[in-house]
Amino acid sequence: VVAVMVGTGDEWVRWQALAESLGIGDRVRWVGIVPYDEIGVWYNACDMLVMPSVTAPADGLNVCVPDAMSCAKPVVGTTAAGNDLAIVDGETGLIVLERDTAALAEAIALLADKPVLRQQMGLLGRLRVTTDLGWPVLAQRYLERFERLRRKD
């Protein structure tokens, strides 16, 4: 398994040091910030997206979750940050308890060992984005909501 870390953050240097101290520095690629118009290359190259969000500091649903799903990639996410708004546990990916590192590792290992399951979840994730989470569907929901609000005046 090779972990590819896309993006940056306050803990970036500490994570790099941790990887080295654990003896896995050669199995982690530190990509950094990727322009939005190039990020699809990384989603399409990966086997899965892992989004181990936590509630402190507060974090909302990251756009990388539906973006990866739109590229037919399963997502391993935590119960934090709205991940469960997009990920259907056991169908489009796996949801684990926030800060449960053993469960997170187990979910990653499960998908790493089961390419057919990854493919099935990825395809269902792409379907979910298309039917439930894509911009046309969301825009229609907003319009319907605004119309209901307008009629109440």
Image: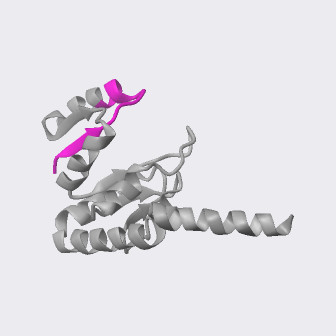
Asked whether 46 or 3 is in front, the reply is: 46
Asked if residue 119 lies left or right of residue 103, the reply is left
The magenta segment: 1-15
Asked if residue 136 lies left or right of residue 36, the reply is right
Res. 103 in view: no
Q: How is the image coloured?
A: one colour
- Name which residue lies at 22% across and 45% down: 3
Looking at the image, the residue that sits furthest to the right is: 153
Asked if residue 84 lies left or right of residue 19, the reply is right
Give the image location of residue 97, x and y in percent: 48, 58
Is residue 13 positioned above or below 109 on the image? above
Q: Is residue 90 magenta?
A: no
- Name which residue lies at 31% across and 32% down: 33
Asked if residue 121 lies left or right of residue 55, the reply is left
- Name which residue lies at 68% across and 66% down: 145
> Which image quarter is the C terminus in?
bottom right
Give the image location of residue 86, x and y in percent: 46, 63
Residue 65 found in image quarter: bottom left
Asked whether 145 or 48 is in front, the reply is: 145
Give the image location of residue 59, x and y in percent: 53, 44
